[in-house]
Amino acid sequence: MWAEGLPCPELEPDVRLRITGMTGELIAELQLPPSAPVADVKRGVLRAAGVPVGEQRLVPAIGSAEPLSDEQTIREVAAGAEAVDMTLVRVEGCLALSWGADRRLRLWDLVAGCAVHDFGGHVSSTQLRGVEVCWERGLALSWGGDKTMRIWDLHRGVQLQSLGGHSAEVLGVQVDWPTSRALSWAADRTLRLWDLQTGMYTELRGHDAHVHGVLLDWGRDRALSWSADDAFLWDLERGTALLVLQDTPGVWACSVHPEWHAALLGAADGLLRCWSFPGGGVVPMAHEGAGPEASVDWKTWRVASWCKGDRSLRLWSPSSSLSQHVPGVYAAQVHWPSNLVVTWSMDYCSLRPQLWDLGPDGSKLERRGEASGCAYDLTSRVQAEIDWNRLRAVSWSEDTHLLRLWDLQSGVVVNHLRGHTGEVNGLQVDWQRDRALSWSGGDTSLRLWDLVSGAQLHEMVREPCGAFDVHVDWDRGWALSWTQDSWGNAEFTIEVWELEHGTAVHLL
């Protein structure tokens, strides 16, 4: 109650706000107090229409064409009027969808640095396994240890559907968004073909163990699935198996012909198998060691394979088979358009790359130059990114602090990129800009490099934990990293970095 003799203040009425799009369509109608900032209007538009805050520019329908700032109050904009019309201008946004051990999905606006939606998540104590996203339709499909798949509306932040049917953990899903179909596989040894509109499914049975992976072609209604010791070719339209390849220990799929005439499969017994469709014939390609790896060029039916067990590099073609002994070989990278292979060898603590010429017809497997250089290293867990146009490579290892820029023609290290004081966990390269971004959990940093000079441009420290992984958008000049908030803490954070100045823009 107001004291006697004091004037009772007049309460300002709320202002009615009408927000329309650039073509006049109604986006939202709101009612807010005059003291509310424009930022509250944007949040209202987000709730009403699902437009991320970072994509919104609000312009008065009458008067200045300049966008309103978030700090301006509605009182300033209304200038005494009871109602205000605004036009929403959408700008290109940058969204990210994250999921983690807390079994929740979150949609982030990376421009505004805030969460757009927290979707909740799966109900099992087992973590969420994966997500397929269709940004054009504003949809996401997630799967996990609760044996379900769930469809989410990214604009409204709600669950549209829960799809149950598997009797064990769902291990993977592929989605064909235009036809609203999905193929899932699980630890219950089955695959399921789903109609996402009705929630109905067709069950595909036959595997004797967990399904490890699937390759498929929606246009041809074909799928190739494999488990621990068998592989199946499926007709998705009929829901039946066309071919079965059994007694193949440790099978993994390498590649399928673009026209689905054949598949190349590897196995732990040292055999590569070219499995022809529809006849089912198998052409074996043998290594003397276990676990060979391979790359195939289906245009010419050539296969390049390498095996650490027998220290060999081999080239297979319909007319010939060639082999080279490569001491210490543990990895290779193939570029079929230029008919080149780079092998990486570790021999007596010496890391050595070697460039090989395959020739255009499978009749050649020769060294291109003799690698004259090497680098001291203690591990064979070295990884590399290759610039095939200029025959350069950047290598890094989780066991060393160094990155190296190689000239692959000579096998010589051109630059040592020094700066990390802990193991290097990952790298992304922009060869056109001669830039590389590396990250280390040991020294909790991301580092931006100039490859030409070998100079470190920026050190971006993320305390107290280093990045688990990083996504780089070189055109925007942004990097997105994610990690634990602190050691032993179940909380995880996402950090947005601006690369030009090496600064953190947002901590999400």
Image (cartoon, rainbow, N blue to C red):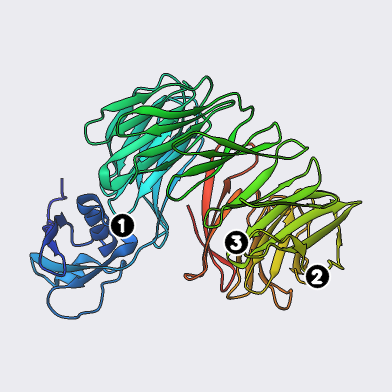
Across and down, in percent, residue 83 comes to: 8, 65
Name which residue type carries label 1: Pro
Q: Residue tagged by mark 3?
A: 336
| Mark 1 or mark 2: whose residue is earlier in sequence | 1
Q: Residue tagged by mark 1?
A: 52
In the displayed orientation, state which residue is furthest to the front: 319
**Is residue 9 at all visible to an observer of this figure?**
no
Name which residue type carries label 3: Trp
Name which residue type carries label 2: Gly
**Residue depicted at 16% across the width and 70% down the height:** 22
373 sits to left or right of 43: right
Across and down, in percent, residue 201 comes to: 29, 27
Q: Residue tagged by mark 2?
A: 369
- Give residue 449's quadrant in the image: bottom right
Q: CA distance from mark 3 to mark 2?
A: 19 Å
**361 lies above or below 48:** below
**191 lies above or below 322:** above
- Crowding at mark 1 (Cα within 10 Å: few <14, some 14-19, many 20+): many
Q: CA distance from mark 1 to mark 3?
A: 43 Å
**481 lies above or below 76:** above
In the image, which disc is placed on residue 164?
Answer: none
Query: SS at mark 3?
Result: helix
Query: SS at mark 2?
Result: loop
